[in-house]
Image (spheres, rainbow, N blue to C red):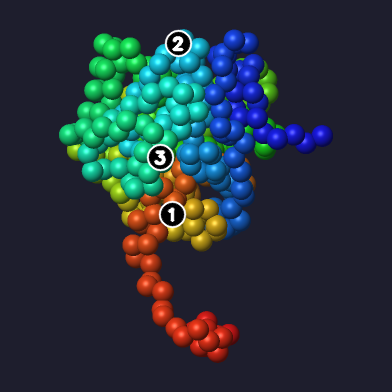
Amino acid sequence: MARPWRGVIEEYRDRLPVGPDTPVVTLGEGGTPLVRSDALSDETRCDVWLKYEGANPTGSFKDRGMTVAISKALEEGSKAVVCASTGNTSASAAAYAGKAGVTCAVLVPKGKVALGKMAGTLVHGARVLEVEGNFDAALELAQDLASNFPVTLVNSVNPHRLQGQKTAAFEICDALGRAPDVHCVPVGNAGNISSQWLGYSEYLNDGVIHEPPRLFGFQAAGAAPIVEGAPVKTPQTIASAIRIGNPASWDKALAAAKESEGAILAVTDREILAAYRRIAREGMFAEPASAASVAGLLRLAGEDRLPEGSTIVCVLTGHGLKDPEWAITGAAHPPSIPADAHAVAAELGL
Ligand SMILES: *Cc1c(COP(=O)(O)O)cnc(C)c1O
Protein backbone atom coordinates (compact mmCIF):
# COMPACT_ATOMS: atom_id res chain seq x y z
CA MET A 1 0.00 0.00 0.00
CA ALA A 2 1.22 3.50 -0.77
CA ARG A 3 2.41 5.49 2.23
CA PRO A 4 3.52 9.08 2.53
CA TRP A 5 7.18 9.93 2.01
CA ARG A 6 8.86 10.17 5.43
CA GLY A 7 11.93 12.31 4.71
CA VAL A 8 15.39 11.06 3.80
CA ILE A 9 16.45 9.83 7.27
CA GLU A 10 13.54 7.41 7.64
CA GLU A 11 13.61 6.40 3.98
CA TYR A 12 17.33 5.59 4.02
CA ARG A 13 17.95 5.09 7.75
CA ASP A 14 20.26 2.08 7.37
CA ARG A 15 22.55 4.09 5.07
CA LEU A 16 22.81 7.19 7.26
CA PRO A 17 24.79 7.91 10.45
CA VAL A 18 21.77 7.80 12.78
CA GLY A 19 20.92 5.49 15.64
CA PRO A 20 17.75 4.69 17.59
CA ASP A 21 18.42 7.64 19.92
CA THR A 22 19.02 10.25 17.23
CA PRO A 23 16.21 12.81 17.37
CA VAL A 24 15.01 13.04 13.76
CA VAL A 25 14.44 16.63 12.64
CA THR A 26 12.65 16.43 9.31
CA LEU A 27 10.45 18.58 7.11
CA GLY A 28 9.73 15.70 4.72
CA GLU A 29 12.68 16.50 2.41
CA GLY A 30 13.67 14.33 -0.56
CA GLY A 31 11.38 12.22 -2.71
CA THR A 32 11.69 14.91 -5.39
CA PRO A 33 10.38 14.49 -8.96
CA LEU A 34 12.53 12.92 -11.66
CA VAL A 35 11.00 14.30 -14.85
CA ARG A 36 11.88 13.22 -18.37
CA SER A 37 12.72 16.09 -20.72
CA ASP A 38 11.37 15.14 -24.13
CA ALA A 39 12.88 18.19 -25.81
CA LEU A 40 16.37 17.66 -24.40
CA SER A 41 16.12 13.93 -25.12
CA ASP A 42 15.23 14.59 -28.75
CA GLU A 43 17.96 17.17 -29.19
CA THR A 44 20.74 15.07 -27.64
CA ARG A 45 19.40 11.68 -28.88
CA CYS A 46 19.71 10.51 -25.31
CA ASP A 47 17.25 9.81 -22.53
CA VAL A 48 17.41 12.95 -20.40
CA TRP A 49 15.89 13.24 -16.93
CA LEU A 50 15.74 16.29 -14.66
CA LYS A 51 15.94 15.77 -10.89
CA TYR A 52 13.90 18.68 -9.55
CA GLU A 53 15.46 19.50 -6.20
CA GLY A 54 13.51 22.78 -6.05
CA ALA A 55 10.65 20.62 -4.71
CA ASN A 56 12.39 20.23 -1.36
CA PRO A 57 10.78 22.02 1.63
CA THR A 58 13.00 25.10 1.47
CA GLY A 59 13.49 24.93 -2.28
CA SER A 60 16.91 23.31 -2.66
CA PHE A 61 18.81 20.05 -2.19
CA LYS A 62 20.42 21.57 0.91
CA ASP A 63 17.50 20.16 2.94
CA ARG A 64 18.74 16.58 2.39
CA GLY A 65 21.95 17.36 4.22
CA MET A 66 20.44 19.72 6.75
CA THR A 67 17.99 17.14 8.16
CA VAL A 68 20.98 14.95 9.06
CA ALA A 69 23.25 17.81 10.22
CA ILE A 70 20.62 19.32 12.52
CA SER A 71 19.47 15.94 13.85
CA LYS A 72 23.08 15.08 14.74
CA ALA A 73 23.70 18.52 16.26
CA LEU A 74 20.67 17.98 18.49
CA GLU A 75 21.84 14.47 19.42
CA GLU A 76 25.22 15.92 20.40
CA GLY A 77 23.53 18.47 22.65
CA SER A 78 24.23 21.53 20.52
CA LYS A 79 22.16 24.62 21.29
CA ALA A 80 23.22 26.71 18.31
CA VAL A 81 24.29 26.24 14.71
CA VAL A 82 26.10 28.54 12.29
CA CYS A 83 26.64 28.58 8.55
CA ALA A 84 28.02 30.78 5.83
CA SER A 85 25.77 30.92 2.80
CA THR A 86 25.07 32.32 -0.62
CA GLY A 87 21.41 31.88 0.43
CA ASN A 88 20.10 28.34 0.15
CA THR A 89 22.14 26.84 2.97
CA SER A 90 20.99 29.60 5.28
CA ALA A 91 17.32 29.18 4.36
CA SER A 92 17.63 25.46 4.98
CA ALA A 93 19.59 25.80 8.23
CA ALA A 94 17.10 28.39 9.50
CA ALA A 95 14.12 26.14 8.78
CA TYR A 96 15.56 22.97 10.34
CA ALA A 97 16.96 24.88 13.34
CA GLY A 98 13.52 26.39 13.80
CA LYS A 99 11.95 22.94 13.73
CA ALA A 100 14.55 21.67 16.24
CA GLY A 101 14.25 24.72 18.48
CA VAL A 102 17.94 25.65 18.34
CA THR A 103 19.47 29.04 17.57
CA CYS A 104 20.67 29.58 14.01
CA ALA A 105 23.25 32.17 13.01
CA VAL A 106 23.86 32.91 9.37
CA LEU A 107 26.80 34.72 7.80
CA VAL A 108 26.05 36.02 4.31
CA PRO A 109 28.16 38.05 1.89
CA LYS A 110 26.94 41.64 2.14
CA GLY A 111 24.41 42.63 -0.54
CA LYS A 112 24.89 39.40 -2.52
CA VAL A 113 21.96 37.24 -1.42
CA ALA A 114 18.90 36.82 -3.65
CA LEU A 115 15.68 38.21 -2.16
CA GLY A 116 13.80 34.91 -1.95
CA LYS A 117 16.67 33.27 -0.10
CA MET A 118 16.96 36.12 2.39
CA ALA A 119 13.19 35.97 2.94
CA GLY A 120 13.39 32.24 3.60
CA THR A 121 16.15 32.77 6.12
CA LEU A 122 14.59 35.67 8.01
CA VAL A 123 11.10 34.21 8.23
CA HIS A 124 12.33 31.18 10.18
CA GLY A 125 13.94 33.42 12.78
CA ALA A 126 17.65 33.04 12.02
CA ARG A 127 20.13 35.66 13.23
CA VAL A 128 21.47 37.03 9.95
CA LEU A 129 24.80 38.86 9.90
CA GLU A 130 26.12 40.45 6.73
CA VAL A 131 29.84 39.93 6.31
CA GLU A 132 31.91 42.53 4.55
CA GLY A 133 33.42 40.10 2.07
CA ASN A 134 32.43 37.31 -0.30
CA PHE A 135 31.19 33.79 0.45
CA ASP A 136 34.69 32.40 0.92
CA ALA A 137 35.41 34.99 3.61
CA ALA A 138 32.09 34.22 5.31
CA LEU A 139 32.88 30.49 5.38
CA GLU A 140 36.29 31.08 6.93
CA LEU A 141 34.65 33.21 9.60
CA ALA A 142 31.99 30.56 10.31
CA GLN A 143 34.68 27.90 10.68
CA ASP A 144 36.65 30.14 13.01
CA LEU A 145 33.55 30.78 15.13
CA ALA A 146 32.71 27.07 15.36
CA SER A 147 36.27 26.15 16.42
CA ASN A 148 36.31 28.67 19.24
CA PHE A 149 32.74 28.95 20.50
CA PRO A 150 29.96 26.49 21.44
CA VAL A 151 28.22 26.43 18.08
CA THR A 152 27.98 23.67 15.42
CA LEU A 153 29.01 24.42 11.85
CA VAL A 154 26.43 23.16 9.33
CA ASN A 155 28.13 24.05 6.06
CA SER A 156 28.91 21.13 3.78
CA VAL A 157 32.30 20.70 5.47
CA ASN A 158 30.13 19.12 8.20
CA PRO A 159 30.33 15.45 7.14
CA HIS A 160 26.68 14.81 8.07
CA ARG A 161 25.62 17.19 5.30
CA LEU A 162 27.28 15.06 2.62
CA GLN A 163 25.78 11.93 4.13
CA GLY A 164 22.28 13.34 3.77
CA GLN A 165 22.89 14.74 0.30
CA LYS A 166 23.99 11.37 -1.06
CA THR A 167 20.34 10.28 -0.91
CA ALA A 168 19.68 12.10 -4.19
CA ALA A 169 21.84 9.47 -5.92
CA PHE A 170 19.87 6.70 -4.18
CA GLU A 171 16.56 8.17 -5.32
CA ILE A 172 17.75 8.47 -8.90
CA CYS A 173 18.87 4.82 -9.00
CA ASP A 174 15.72 3.65 -7.21
CA ALA A 175 13.53 5.49 -9.75
CA LEU A 176 15.42 4.37 -12.88
CA GLY A 177 16.12 0.84 -11.63
CA ARG A 178 19.78 1.48 -12.47
CA ALA A 179 22.31 4.31 -12.37
CA PRO A 180 22.26 6.78 -15.26
CA ASP A 181 25.19 6.67 -17.68
CA VAL A 182 25.90 10.35 -17.14
CA HIS A 183 25.10 12.57 -14.15
CA CYS A 184 25.38 16.36 -14.56
CA VAL A 185 25.43 18.73 -11.59
CA PRO A 186 26.38 22.36 -10.87
CA VAL A 187 29.48 22.84 -8.73
CA GLY A 188 29.89 25.64 -6.18
CA ASN A 189 31.46 24.66 -2.89
CA ALA A 190 31.59 21.15 -4.42
CA GLY A 191 29.80 19.34 -1.61
CA ASN A 192 26.95 18.14 -3.76
CA ILE A 193 28.99 16.42 -6.46
CA SER A 194 31.07 14.79 -3.71
CA SER A 195 27.99 13.55 -1.88
CA GLN A 196 26.39 12.18 -5.02
CA TRP A 197 29.53 10.20 -5.84
CA LEU A 198 29.41 8.89 -2.29
CA GLY A 199 25.83 7.72 -2.90
CA TYR A 200 26.54 6.04 -6.23
CA SER A 201 29.70 4.41 -4.85
CA GLU A 202 27.77 3.00 -1.93
CA TYR A 203 25.09 1.50 -4.17
CA LEU A 204 27.81 0.10 -6.41
CA ASN A 205 29.72 -1.51 -3.53
CA ASP A 206 26.53 -3.08 -2.22
CA GLY A 207 25.53 -4.40 -5.64
CA VAL A 208 22.37 -2.28 -5.88
CA ILE A 209 23.72 -0.90 -9.16
CA HIS A 210 26.23 -2.59 -11.45
CA GLU A 211 27.70 0.39 -13.29
CA PRO A 212 28.33 3.85 -11.85
CA PRO A 213 27.52 6.98 -13.86
CA ARG A 214 30.15 9.32 -15.20
CA LEU A 215 29.92 12.48 -13.11
CA PHE A 216 30.19 15.85 -14.83
CA GLY A 217 30.33 18.92 -12.62
CA PHE A 218 29.85 22.40 -14.04
CA GLN A 219 31.24 25.64 -12.66
CA ALA A 220 30.39 29.08 -13.99
CA ALA A 221 33.18 30.43 -16.23
CA GLY A 222 33.74 33.47 -13.95
CA ALA A 223 33.90 31.26 -10.87
CA ALA A 224 35.75 28.16 -12.06
CA PRO A 225 38.65 27.57 -9.64
CA ILE A 226 38.66 23.78 -10.07
CA VAL A 227 38.73 24.05 -13.86
CA GLU A 228 41.49 26.65 -13.73
CA GLY A 229 43.39 24.83 -10.99
CA ALA A 230 43.66 27.86 -8.70
CA PRO A 231 41.36 29.77 -6.33
CA VAL A 232 39.49 32.72 -7.88
CA LYS A 233 39.76 35.87 -5.75
CA THR A 234 36.64 37.65 -6.97
CA PRO A 235 34.35 35.02 -8.49
CA GLN A 236 31.76 36.48 -10.83
CA THR A 237 28.61 34.95 -12.28
CA ILE A 238 24.88 35.60 -12.32
CA ALA A 239 24.51 32.11 -10.79
CA SER A 240 24.86 33.22 -7.16
CA ALA A 241 24.65 29.72 -5.66
CA ILE A 242 27.87 28.72 -7.42
CA ARG A 243 29.67 32.06 -7.05
CA ILE A 244 32.46 30.48 -5.03
CA GLY A 245 36.17 31.02 -5.54
CA ASN A 246 37.71 28.44 -3.21
CA PRO A 247 35.49 25.35 -2.86
CA ALA A 248 35.72 23.50 0.46
CA SER A 249 35.31 20.07 -1.18
CA TRP A 250 37.70 20.74 -4.05
CA ASP A 251 39.69 17.49 -3.68
CA LYS A 252 36.61 15.34 -3.24
CA ALA A 253 35.03 16.81 -6.37
CA LEU A 254 38.15 16.15 -8.42
CA ALA A 255 38.27 12.59 -7.10
CA ALA A 256 34.59 12.07 -8.01
CA ALA A 257 35.18 13.26 -11.56
CA LYS A 258 38.34 11.20 -11.94
CA GLU A 259 37.07 7.95 -10.42
CA SER A 260 33.85 8.10 -12.43
CA GLU A 261 35.63 9.02 -15.67
CA GLY A 262 33.78 12.32 -15.82
CA ALA A 263 35.12 15.87 -15.57
CA ILE A 264 34.72 19.28 -13.98
CA LEU A 265 34.07 21.84 -16.72
CA ALA A 266 32.99 25.46 -17.05
CA VAL A 267 29.93 26.97 -18.75
CA THR A 268 29.42 30.65 -19.48
CA ASP A 269 26.67 32.81 -17.98
CA ARG A 270 25.21 33.08 -21.46
CA GLU A 271 24.94 29.28 -21.69
CA ILE A 272 23.49 29.15 -18.18
CA LEU A 273 20.80 31.71 -19.00
CA ALA A 274 19.89 29.99 -22.27
CA ALA A 275 19.50 26.67 -20.43
CA TYR A 276 17.53 28.41 -17.66
CA ARG A 277 14.99 29.73 -20.15
CA ARG A 278 14.78 26.41 -22.00
CA ILE A 279 13.94 24.27 -19.03
CA ALA A 280 11.49 26.90 -17.80
CA ARG A 281 9.63 26.53 -21.12
CA GLU A 282 9.26 22.85 -20.24
CA GLY A 283 7.65 23.75 -16.92
CA MET A 284 10.74 23.41 -14.74
CA PHE A 285 11.48 26.65 -12.90
CA ALA A 286 14.98 26.36 -11.47
CA GLU A 287 17.34 29.10 -10.32
CA PRO A 288 20.18 30.13 -12.65
CA ALA A 289 22.86 28.09 -10.83
CA SER A 290 20.74 24.97 -11.32
CA ALA A 291 20.66 25.49 -15.06
CA ALA A 292 24.44 25.01 -15.19
CA SER A 293 23.81 21.25 -15.26
CA VAL A 294 21.67 21.54 -18.40
CA ALA A 295 24.03 24.10 -19.96
CA GLY A 296 26.76 21.55 -19.36
CA LEU A 297 24.74 18.76 -20.92
CA LEU A 298 24.24 20.85 -24.04
CA ARG A 299 27.95 21.63 -24.09
CA LEU A 300 28.80 17.90 -23.92
CA ALA A 301 26.25 17.14 -26.64
CA GLY A 302 27.66 19.90 -28.84
CA GLU A 303 31.13 18.40 -28.47
CA ASP A 304 29.75 14.96 -29.38
CA ARG A 305 30.77 13.49 -26.05
CA LEU A 306 27.51 11.67 -25.32
CA PRO A 307 27.02 8.21 -26.85
CA GLU A 308 23.59 8.01 -28.51
CA GLY A 309 20.93 6.50 -26.26
CA SER A 310 22.72 7.34 -23.01
CA THR A 311 20.58 7.74 -19.91
CA ILE A 312 21.38 11.15 -18.43
CA VAL A 313 20.30 12.88 -15.25
CA CYS A 314 20.73 16.63 -14.77
CA VAL A 315 20.22 17.86 -11.22
CA LEU A 316 18.16 21.05 -10.96
CA THR A 317 19.50 22.05 -7.57
CA GLY A 318 17.14 24.84 -6.49
CA HIS A 319 13.79 26.53 -7.15
CA GLY A 320 13.54 29.45 -9.56
CA LEU A 321 11.28 31.51 -7.30
CA LYS A 322 14.19 32.09 -4.92
CA ASP A 323 15.98 34.26 -7.46
CA PRO A 324 13.25 35.48 -9.84
CA GLU A 325 15.17 38.46 -11.20
CA TRP A 326 16.35 36.62 -14.29
CA ALA A 327 12.86 35.39 -15.13
CA ILE A 328 11.64 38.98 -15.38
CA THR A 329 14.73 40.59 -16.87
CA GLY A 330 14.50 40.23 -20.63
CA ALA A 331 10.84 39.12 -20.64
CA ALA A 332 8.40 41.20 -22.67
CA HIS A 333 6.26 43.61 -20.65
CA PRO A 334 2.67 42.27 -20.59
CA PRO A 335 0.42 44.32 -22.94
CA SER A 336 -2.45 46.21 -21.30
CA ILE A 337 -5.92 45.52 -22.74
CA PRO A 338 -9.54 46.42 -21.93
CA ALA A 339 -11.61 43.87 -19.96
CA ASP A 340 -13.30 42.54 -23.06
CA ALA A 341 -13.17 39.00 -24.52
CA HIS A 342 -12.90 40.28 -28.11
CA ALA A 343 -9.88 42.41 -27.19
CA VAL A 344 -8.23 39.43 -25.47
CA ALA A 345 -8.96 37.17 -28.45
CA ALA A 346 -7.54 39.78 -30.85
CA GLU A 347 -4.39 40.13 -28.73
CA LEU A 348 -3.93 36.34 -28.63
CA GLY A 349 -4.71 35.90 -32.33
CA LEU A 350 -7.55 33.44 -31.63
C1 LIG B 1 24.41 25.06 -2.94
C2 LIG B 1 23.91 25.10 -4.32
C3 LIG B 1 24.70 24.71 -5.41
C4 LIG B 1 26.13 24.32 -5.27
O1 LIG B 1 26.30 23.11 -4.55
P1 LIG B 1 27.71 22.80 -3.89
O2 LIG B 1 27.46 21.65 -3.01
O3 LIG B 1 28.10 24.02 -3.14
O4 LIG B 1 28.64 22.51 -5.01
C5 LIG B 1 24.14 24.74 -6.67
N1 LIG B 1 22.87 25.13 -6.85
C6 LIG B 1 22.08 25.51 -5.83
C7 LIG B 1 20.69 25.94 -6.12
C8 LIG B 1 22.57 25.51 -4.53
O5 LIG B 1 21.79 25.89 -3.53
**Badge 3 amino acid:** Val
**Badge 1 amino acid:** Ala
Pick the quarter of the image with the N terminus. Answer: top right
Tell me which residue sits at (51%, 44%) in the image. Answer: 54
Residue at the disc numbered 1: 275
Q: Position of residue 42 (x, y in %)?
A: 59, 57
Contact check, label 3 and label 1, Cβ < 8 Å:
no
Residue at the disc numbered 3: 123
Give residue 77's mark. Answer: 2
Q: Cβ of disc 2 within 8 Å of ligand 1?
A: no
- Camera-near label (3 vs 1) is 3
- Let me know if residue 239 appears in the view: no
Front-lying residue, 16 or 194 = 16
Tell me which residue sits at (37%, 62%) in the image. Answer: 328
CA distance separating discs 3 and 2: 25 Å
Q: Position of residue 170 (x, y in %)?
A: 61, 29
